[in-house]
């Protein structure tokens, strides 16, 4: 069962936050870090929300709570910016491009198949197909515990309908730079037949760094390159230097 935010929030402590503006490209897994998780989730959410507002000055920052039985409770939801990932391990504000889900797992407990299925569906609904990262990959924290982290590393939370993983080996990464103000980053994969959304540069398993070719393009060229996953138009040959495909990033204002 999916419960909307109106099901549990109160008039005294409603969930608020800035509207989401940047593309959301990375799924993030969280847990409470406690073994004392109430069975009654409405009262738990209300208690956490009141504590956040009174002591931190803002609403709970997760998009959803996903329970072990597969139920979900909308917290901020995708229309509001996340406030759960400060991102002190990555550049910029990770709240701008992350989709955080809080799992009601205990400290050393793993995520159930029912909860994984619900989380995948929620991430899919906003077009986030990347492998989730544990919260501690973004912030200096122990969240989301060793068990959930191991599940993520093993691919158990991967989306089976997601675009194919990055090729290994002789792939060439090409960064396309379109700088008009503070743009939002979107990663794309060219597979040889179509373009597929991938991840933000900060979440790449192979970081953009020394030796990466950077090409300046104008807005028209960029629009020609950024297409939906259904596009079959080949990538221009000057951007492909290996038979195994190419990766690039595009910063859009």
Image: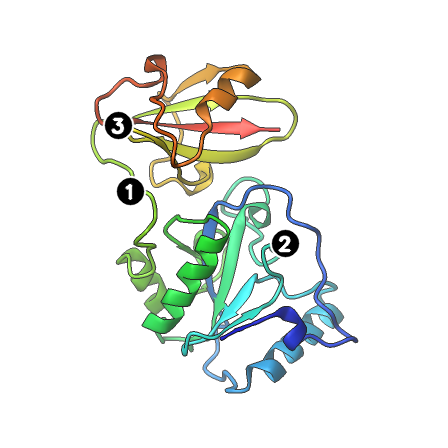
The residue labelled by disc 2 is 79
Point out the tag, 2 or 3, that comes first from the N-terminus: 2
Residue displayed at 29% across by 61% down: 156
Residue 164, disc: 1
Q: Can residue 135 be seen in this view?
A: no
Residue 13, disc: none
Residue displayed at 30% across by 56% down: 153
Q: Which of marks 1 and 3 is in front?
A: 1
Q: In this picture, is 92 found above or below 140? A: above
Point out the tag, 1 or 3, that comes first from the N-terminus: 1
Q: Residue furthest top?
A: 238
**Discs 1, 2 touching: Cβ within 8 Å:** no
SS class, disc 2: loop
> In this view of the protein, which residue sits in the foreground, 226 or 91?
226
The residue labelled by disc 3 is 171
> In this view of the protein, which residue sits in the foreground, 219 or 173?
219
SS class, disc 3: loop
Viewed as shown, does residue 11 lie left or right of 103? right
Q: Residue furthest right?
A: 12
């Amino acid at each position: 069962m999916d419960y909307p935010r109106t099901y549990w929030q109160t008039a005294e402590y409603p969930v608020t936050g800035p509207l989401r503006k940047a593309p959301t490209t990375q799924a993030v897994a969280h847990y409470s870090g406690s073994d004392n998780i109430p069975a009654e989730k409405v009262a738990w959410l209300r208690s956490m929300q009141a504590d956040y507002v009174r002591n931190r000055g803002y609403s709970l920052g997760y998009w959803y709570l996903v329970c072990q039985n597969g139920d979900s409770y909308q917290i901020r939801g995708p229309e509001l910016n996340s406030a759960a990932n400060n991102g002190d391990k990555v550049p910029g504000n990770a709240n701008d491009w992350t989709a955080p889900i809080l799992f009601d797992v205990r400290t050393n407990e793993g995520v159930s198949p029912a909860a994984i299925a619900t989380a995948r569906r929620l991430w899919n609904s906003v077009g986030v197909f990347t492998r989730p990262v544990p919260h501690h990959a973004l912030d200096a924290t122990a969240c989301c515990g060793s068990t959930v982290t191991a599940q993520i590393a093993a691919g158990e939370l991967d989306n089976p309908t997601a675009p194919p993983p990055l090729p290994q080996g002789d792939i060439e990464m090409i960064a396309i730079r379109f700088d008009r103000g503070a743009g939002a980053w979107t990663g794309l994969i060219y597979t040889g037949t179509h373009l597929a959304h991938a991840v933000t540069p900060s979440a790449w398993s192979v970081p953009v760094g020394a030796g990466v070719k950077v090409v300046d393009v104008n807005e028209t060229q960029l629009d020609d390159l950024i297409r939906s996953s259904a596009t079959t138009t080949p990538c221009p040959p000057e951007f492909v230097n290996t038979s195994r495909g190419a990766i690039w990033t595009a910063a859009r204002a």
